[in-house]
Image (cartoon, grey):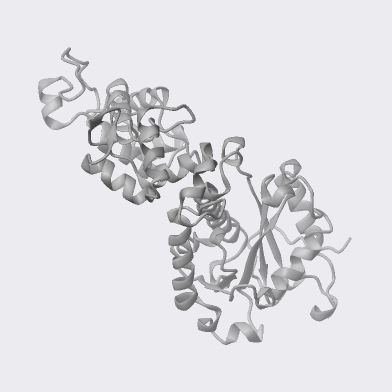
Amino acid sequence: MSHHHFTLSSRIKLEGFLDEGKPIIKCAELLDKNPSSIHGEIRRNALTINEAKKNQVANLGQPARVPTPKNKYNYLGEVADRKAKKRRAKANQCHLVLTDNENDLSIAITRCLKKRWSPEQISACLRLGKITINGLKKKVIIAVQTIYDWIYRFHKELTKYLRHNRGYRHNRQYYINKEKRKERQQEKGIDKRPEIVNTRLRIGDFEGDTILGKHHGATGRIGTLTERRTGFLLAFILPPLTKEQQSLPEDEKELYRLTMGMRFADSAVKVLTAKMKPKFLKTLTLDNGSENNGFEWIERAIPSLEVFFAHPYHSWERGTNENTNGLLRQYFPKGMDFGKITQEMLDKAVWEINNRPRKRLGWKSPQEKMWQNAALIASKKSCDLN
């Protein structure tokens, strides 16, 4: 599913689909977007009731009449694009003035930093119009994070004027996620997991993790899910960060770790529901990293499955999954460029692992044990040992 912003082209296409009477779900499918994104686009950028009645756009400096919408949502692609661009320019005006080029605002901020003012103090005083910019005191709205980003991206020599000069700075979202992980550990920790999971007497308790490719996952990752009783493995490819995302400072990548968490959650839901019968989806134990922040989506999508988290740095609490990841590393060793791996290649490796005989299973394979317990969804049995 696309995570890109709407463009003029996509907005014109959406207008055409709505004019044809296509439902929102169908429009989302055709545009490769989430239905909620379509609803949000229409809510924000369609003509208001007054605009539709007057057949003009009131707040865009466009006195000329516009075409009459042919759909019930009063949505016009070109008008929606103008609205969106105006709103984005207004929202981002404070971000556009701080670049690597010197200007009046950057000179004023540098002057304040050299007085040992914190970025928070600078931001607040700019908002109140207390800082002189090119001889004038005028109000400028600029976020604290924007000032920090400007310092660490373009003027690291100014970090010496900050109170804490670490050479890097975690953004606000990093600390929010850190607190969330602490809360999550208390609410969803492995200590709260049902005791029956430790006995391995039933099928349906999974452990999950991600395997990193070359350059600490920059070339991609593999998500893995291992069933505790049988050792049955499910795996899927998680695409890498784009070149633009890879070029960002390390502290800014926290946002994309959140994105990776949703990718893991979405892929986990798809593979579990495609391979396993619902009654055999009971628990999932993950590590406490930020890449697993999408666990709530997993629980909403699979109501019978409850997610728990191992203690930090206690990998042995997910020992079945860790050992199975070691088997998968025989096919995809450390330092390998995961960008060259296809899902077909991964599926072949997983099939071979699932069909290896295991001593603890009485020399039966995980695939055999799953079929014996009728836990898999498939058209035909495939557990021959080769």
Direction from residue 151 to residue 79 in the image, left or right: left
Q: Residue 209 in the image: state x and y as whole percent.
A: 64, 63
Work out whether residue 249 or residue 363 is closer to the camera in this orientation and state it.
249
Work out whether residue 45 or residue 375 is closer to the camera in this orientation and state it.
45
Q: Residue at x 55, y 79 (%)?
A: 190
Q: Is residue 331 above or below residue 31?
A: below
Q: Is residue 127 above or below residue 58?
A: below
Q: Of all residues shown, which one is farthest toward the right?
A: 386
Q: Of all residues shown, which one is farthest toward the front?
A: 115
Q: Residue 215 in the image: state x and y as whole percent.
A: 72, 48
Work out whether residue 240 or residue 130 is closer to the camera in this orientation and state it.
130
Q: Quadrant of residue 129?
A: top left
Direction from residue 3 to residue 24 in the image, left or right: left
Q: Residue 20 in the image: state x and y as whole percent.
A: 32, 26
Q: Is residue 302 visible?
A: no
Q: Residue 386 in the image: state x and y as whole percent.
A: 89, 60
Q: Residue at x 28, y 41 (%)?
A: 126
Q: Is residue 99 visible?
A: yes
Q: Quadrant of residue 352?
A: bottom right
Q: Residue at x 44, y 76 (%)?
A: 187
Count of numbered circles in the view:
0
Direction from residue 319 to residue 4 in the image, left or right: left
